[in-house]
Image (cartoon, coloured by chain):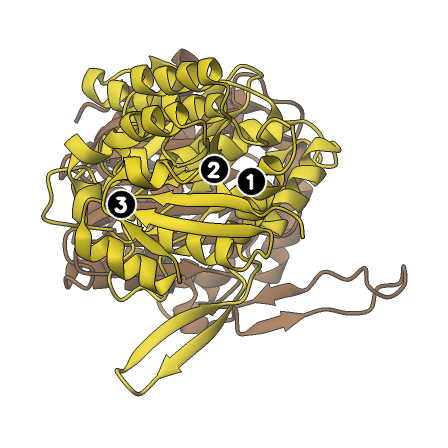
Amino acid sequence: MGGVHAGHYDALPDSRVMAVLDIRLEAAERLAESYSASAYDNMEKMLAEEDIDIVSITTPTPYHKKCVLTAAAAGKHIFCEKPIAMTVEDGLEMTEACRKAGVAFMVGHVLRYFPEYAAAKAMIDKGAVGKVGMVSTSRGGSFPQASGDWYADKSKSGGLVLDMIIHDFDWLRWSLGDVIRVYAKGLVEKAGEHKDYALVTLRFANGAIAHVEGTWMRPDGFKTCLEVAGDKGLITFNNDDSAPIKLAFTGSGGAGNAVAVPNSPLAEEDDPYRLEIADFLKAIKSEEEPPISGEDAVEALKISLAVLESISTGQPVEVLR
Amino acid sequence: MMKRIRVGMMSFAHMHAGSYASCLEKMPQVELVGVADEDDARGRAAAEAHNTDYYKSYDSLLKQNLDGVVICSENYRHLEMTEMAAAAGADILCEKPISTNADDARKMIDLCRQAKVRLQTAFPCRFSPAVAQVRDIVREGRLGEIVAVKATNRGRMPGGWFVDSRLSGGGAIIDHTVHVADLLRWYTGAEAIEVYAEAGTMFNDIEAEDAGLLTISYDNGIFATLDTSWSRPKSFPTWGDVYMEFTGTEGVAGVDAFIQRLDHYSDENMSYGWAGWGSNTDMGLIRDWVDCLGSDREPSITGEDGLRALEVALAAYRSIASGKPECV
């Protein structure tokens, strides 16, 4: 994700990449080279030597807190990938540290910038389905690959509940308001290696119900679905049906073994990651609160943690505001 | 000429009666003896539509030496209808859900056993070729060990007695839980042990619930969710869906039982609708039942099967009341 952020800072008119930090110096050097930036494997050293305004944090989740606190202490504005932290206490501490340091803090719940989800939210707000009753979302594909296989270590990633469908939880909370109660079943407690799956029920303060599926057990490509049913209408979306491009090539293993890969390209300026970083920069320049606050990220985290608790206890769990 | 199997229709209160009668009419070995319905207009119209006789009273129909009857009354009358049919010695195909409550369902099963008549529950989804094919894939273990199932059986709000819980037993949950609950038992052989549900009345100005989301735990460790909502708007292109997605350790399988269709856009009334072309599941159900009537075998879907599926819906209602997962 660091490479994605760097590319967008570089492409946007008001920012450029000054330095890249990674505990593996050679990885930092590889990315830094593309932007003629400096490479570091020590955060304090980077903050001392470089004249930078913003720190973008794309480490595995357990290291978010240390990075955010360090950057805030140095007076840097901070963009942090989701989930904000592994615990509510850590998330609140990070948010508070940024507030005290007077630096802007935004968390990358990027789903809000995906055009299909942004459009669905706008339609809900305009009353396109009337009063929302039931929402269904699905997200997932095969097990994610990452450096050090850190997704497979649930103590680091929290599995798909904390790392992936927190996107849906944030979008749902943004669109429907606070969640009061969750009930969920999942594989978190008994996961085999490289498998994760969860089915979640959310109940909102406004009465609506959401049905959320997350899977890292789908071998046939990454899929997302969204459905919003209200008393005046219904919105449905799935990424396969709306992909303008479907490509399949005769494979080297012979005919008939190629899987069609759907592709849904967007203009550069509509890229969701571009949009979230542009919004962050805009907020800094205008000295406004960034659109996705630490508090928002903590609320999404609370939902994920309640889901994990429900999965382990087998009971519904109240989500306290 | 072979003696024809004599079948009567008890009540057209449930809209599926028309489809079952049409299927029966198509079978040369069946004689559709008549339609009984206390609603004179409804009964006469049905009898006329299906080229058979109308009987004002169930007794007079049941005196016609019937081999079998199809019960499509309001759900709460299934016991009463079953008592009459069993007393007349007719085998029974009873519309789902088997009843509004477990006591009545158990009585139906017991009294049929005592009267030596065969009681079948109408679960036509088992006769979807796609549903049956994915069952084979699951049972052959091609998905590895099944972990979870995500299912939907959603529809438009049916109105009429369906939304009067005294007659139907509830709303969307009792109407739309039992199909998938039956299919999951049939697929996996597992029994539901616990149900958690959230529900509400979200889409329509009715008293019964029109939104329901169940989480069902099975005795073999599988968990499933089932959206039973009447959440399809009036402008939706079809009546609803029966969809199940199985996630296993070696793969996934989705089956959308009623997706085989033509998309139809019409300027006539500026509408978009689906014209289904999949195999008629009701025909499969009726063909199997008639085969049962003509043989000595047990029904392929029993009264117990109907009760097991109903128990999942009843546990969902208890969960809604208690706010906790409830044992089935």
In the displayed structure image, the side of residue A270 where residue A148 appears, left or right: right
Foreground disc of the pair 3, 2: 2
What amino acid is at disc 3?
Answer: Met
| Distance (Cα) linking label 1 and label 2 | 9 Å
Q: Residues within 10 Å of mark 2 (few under 14, many from 20)?
A: many
Quarter residue B146 falls in:
top right
Classify A39 as above or below B105. Answer: below
Identify which residue is drawn at 57% across, 59% down. Answer: B279
Chain with brown colouring: A
In the rendered image, residue B177, in percent from the top left (x then y), is placed at: 37, 34
Q: Residue B27: percent from the left, percent from the top?
A: 57, 56
- Kindly indicate which chain is depicted in yellow in the rendered structure: B
Which SS class for mark 1? Answer: helix
**Residue sitting nearer the eye, B63 or A151:** B63
In 3D space, how far apart are the residues under numbered discs 3 and 2 (Cα atoms)?
41 Å
Give the image location of residue B98, x and y in percent: 37, 29
> Is residue B312 shown left or right of residue B132?
left
- Res. A69 visible in picture: no
Q: Which labelled disc corresponds to residue B68?
A: 2
In terms of sequence position, does the residue under pointer 1 or pointer 2 come before the other? 2
- Vertical placement of B135 versus B278: above or below? above
Q: Give the number of the disc on residue A134.
A: 3
**Chain letter, disc 3 residue:** A
In the image, taking residue A235 as reference, residue A18 lies left or right, namely right
Say which amino acid is labelled 2.
Gly
Write down the chain letter for disc 2.
Answer: B
Give the residue type that dot 1 points to.
Trp
Q: Which element is circle 2 on? A: strand
Mark 1 vs mark 3: give the one in front.
1
Front residue of this view, candidates B156 and B121: B121
Q: Are marks 1 and 2 in contact (CB under 8 Å)?
A: yes
